[in-house]
């Protein structure tokens, strides 16, 4: 019988018995730890009892093993093997629903746990790549620490070995933030890397899991590859998997299996080294060490918890209690690791308290998104990237020669456009999806870019980068205050933003998210809006043009169409409707509203108040309630 992804009945009975005894002794929550063990989390935070497979069995050969399962009664066939490793060709069948999008493949955990679901996709990926892109090569593997990552990592390692990969480099405990994976790929000159994450979506047995592949440049695989992966999932017939034991991902070092090896590395070191080369850590440290400056970072029990202490505390001198929710957990502490005003409410409440900190920030599940706040002040992502770009050359050593170019996603506000115009820099408007920035970076056309969905970054890697954005903001604040004497009032986050508005004008911006809508109704709404493009003359606003955004890449000539329906008015105001592909169920309808205001006297108006006429028009124009049944958005940004 082929080995199963699940524990044997004997093992399950043993684990269940052990947990039952623990439940009688102590109240708490049972969870699967990142090292594959079962743990009992007591109601007291200091109490944790762990039962690992290795400790329960005298022989590690009897411990739980993860592998692929034959989809038929026939035995796996042996295929050509690397030195010292037995490779099996396991029969399988195509599985529906493996369409790969801009952020890889995302589904509920229970879907990925179905027989060969993940294994099929991994093999389809290898079938989609030229052999020279991975044979005897180096691949990187890591993730955000969510539930199912350790089990998935073992499956990926065995299939990689089965397909002739020479070495897999894995973050300790399977941990590597998305920006760190990109950084490690680039530093180690790897052939590519797997990222196990569903980004800002919830984690746990009932929630989300995801997988994506990044190229040797460190950027997400292009559509030409993701389309091939999907095509191969529809025709796959066998999975090549190595007959090797599970690798202990909790210990640093190299494990060899014949000519194939797995190296477990510190997930922080390469990334930290890069950040020290990009920023002036001494400048930031001087700010953070000032007694009148208080800093708070919310890791949201996600992957940046592994990076927060080494960077902010150990290197920059922040106090240990400045890190909130700093321990990565498989279920993100039952939270939703999306750094916005709704899901990072704990941080928002602290920042808006009467005696709140001077600077606050949060990052998401896999560490590529960020939210920045000042004392009682929220910085929109659209403003954030514009302000970083405007100050980059002066405050960040990496940009001492000046940015090469600036870019934003289409739904992001036009604040960055005005910076590019003033600095006389090339500017690009691209579809949503970080891979569109990557081509421009590789061509030397782009340095700083961002998306309104809390993603900001630069060409130091090929992913958006949450901690990079936080360090960029700390650099700006530190530079503005470097000559301030002790006790002198510091320039605040709000001061920096308002000075920027006074120079460039303010782009009032808001996004309404309607999550997990019925896909049929959401798609019908978008089709209705596309039909409306040629007919619409909305209200008192004079329509300049309406279209369904299409983008032609200036580097490779590829075309991305149907990227969002835009209504652009003569005063520069915009209403945009778009379906998001980053969730694991249903459709998320996003409505973007933007209005430019050059008058400084009106810059302090609340964004929702300033935008109300446009918001009302957007909801009326789209008939959103009729199509989706939704009265209110899930999230307002």
Image (spheres, helix red, strand yellow):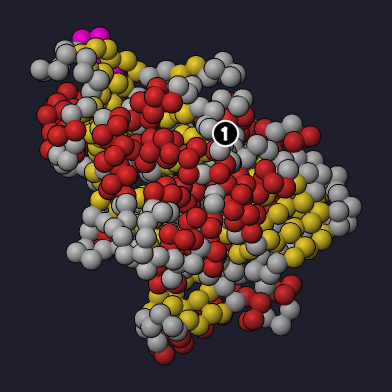
Q: Residues in magenta?
A: 530-535
Foreground of the two, 554 or 26 = 554
Quadrant including the N terminus:
bottom right
Residue visible at 44% across and 66% down? 289
Rendered view: 627 above or below 359:
above
x and y percentages locating residue 282 in the rendered image: 53, 58
x and y percentages locating residue 560 in the rendered image: 47, 21
Q: Residue furthest top?
A: 534
User: Does 533 lie within the magenta span?
Assistant: yes
x and y percentages locating residue 368 in the rendered image: 48, 47
Rendered view: 518 above or below 39:
above
Q: Horizontal placement of 612 versus 426: left or right?
A: left
Q: Quadrant of residue 216?
A: top right
What residue is disc 1 on? Answer: 401
x and y percentages locating residue 241 in the rendered image: 73, 50
Residue visible at 69% across and 46% down? 187
Is residue 195 at all visible to an observer of this figure?
no
Rendered view: 27 above or below 563:
below
Residue visible at 12% across and 29% down? 613
Label 1, secondary structure: give it. Answer: loop
Q: Horizontal placement of 322 versus 55: left or right?
A: left
Q: Residue furthest bottom?
A: 25
Q: Horizontal placement of 593 versus 108: left or right?
A: left
């Amino acid at each position: 019988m082929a080995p199963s992804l699940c524990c044997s009945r004997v093992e399950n009975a043993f684990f269940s018995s052990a947990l039952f005894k623990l439940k009688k002794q102590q109240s708490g929550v049972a969870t699967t730890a990142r090292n594959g063990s079962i743990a009992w989390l007591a109601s007291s935070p200091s109490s944790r009892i762990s039962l690992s497979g290795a400790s329960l069995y005298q022989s590690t050969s009897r411990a739980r093993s993860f592998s692929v399962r034959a989809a038929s009664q026939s035995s796996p066939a042996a295929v050509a093997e690397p030195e010292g490793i037995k490779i099996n060709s396991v029969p399988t069948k195509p599985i529906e629903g493996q369409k790969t999008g801009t952020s890889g493949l995302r589904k509920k955990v229970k879907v990925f746990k179905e027989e060969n679901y993940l294994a099929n996709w991994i093999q389809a990926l290898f079938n989609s790549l030229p052999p020279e892109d991975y044979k005897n090569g180096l691949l990187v593997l890591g993730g955000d620490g969510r539930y199912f990552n350790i089990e998935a990592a073992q499956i990926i390692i065995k299939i990689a070995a089965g397909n002739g990969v020479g070495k897999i480099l894995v973050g300790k405990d399977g941990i590597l933030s998305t920006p760190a994976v990109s950084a490690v790929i680039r530093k180690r000159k790897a052939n590519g890397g797997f990222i196990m994450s569903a980004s800002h979506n919830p984690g746990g047995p009932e929630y989300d899991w995801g997988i994506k592949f990044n190229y040797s440049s460190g950027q997400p695989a292009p559509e030409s590859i993701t389309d091939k992966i999907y095509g191969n999932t529809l025709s796959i017939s066998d999975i090549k998997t190595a007959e090797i034991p599970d690798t202990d991902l909790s210990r640093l070092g190299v494990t060899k299996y014949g000519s194939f090896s797995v190296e477990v590395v510190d997930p922080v070191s390469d990334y930290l080294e890069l950040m020290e080369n990009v920023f002036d850590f001494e400048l930031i440290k001087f700010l953070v060490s000032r007694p009148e400056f208080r800093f708070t970072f919310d890791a949201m029990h996600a992957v940046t918890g592994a990076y927060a202490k080494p960077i902010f505390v150990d290197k920059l001198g922040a106090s240990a209690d400045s890190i909130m929710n700093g321990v990565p957990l498989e279920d993100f502490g039952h939270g939703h690791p999306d750094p916005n005003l709704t899901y990072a409410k704990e941080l928002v409440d602290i920042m808006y308290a009467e005696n709140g900190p001077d600077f606050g920030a949060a990052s998401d599940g896999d560490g590529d998104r960020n939210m920045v706040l000042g004392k009682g002040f929220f910085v929109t992502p659209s403003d954030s990237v514009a302000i970083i770009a405007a100050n980059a050359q002066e405050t960040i050593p990496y940009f001492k020669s000046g940015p090469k170019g600036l870019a934003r996603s289409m739904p992001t506000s036009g604040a960055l456009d005005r910076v590019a115009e003033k600095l006389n820099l090339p500017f690009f408007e691209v579809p949503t999806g970080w891979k569109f920035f990557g081509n421009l970076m590789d061509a030397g056309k782009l340095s700083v870019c961002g998306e309104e969905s809390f993603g900001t970054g630069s060409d130091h890697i090929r992913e958006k980068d949450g901690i990079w954005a936080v360090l960029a903001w700390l650099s700006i604040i530190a530079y503005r205050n470097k000559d301030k004497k002790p006790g002198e009032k510091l320039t605040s986050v709000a001061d920096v933003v308002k000075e920027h508005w006074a120079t460039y004008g303010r782009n009032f911006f808001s996004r309404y998210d309607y999550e997990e809508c019925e896909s049929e109704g959401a798609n019908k709404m978008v089709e209705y809006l596309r039909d409306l493009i040629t007919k619409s003359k909305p209200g008192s606003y004079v329509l300049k043009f309406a279209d369904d955004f299409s983008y032609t890449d200036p580097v490779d000539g590829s075309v991305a169409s149907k990227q969002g329906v835009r209504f652009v008015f003569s005063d520069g105001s915009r209403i945009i409707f778009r379906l998001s592909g980053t969730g694991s169920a249903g459709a998320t309808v996003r409505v973007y509203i933007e209005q430019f205001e050059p008058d400084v006297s009106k810059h302090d108006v609340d964004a929702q108040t300033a935008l109300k006429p446009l918001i009302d028009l957007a909801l009326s124009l789209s008939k959103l309630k009729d199509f989706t049944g939704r009265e209110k958005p899930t999230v307002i940004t």
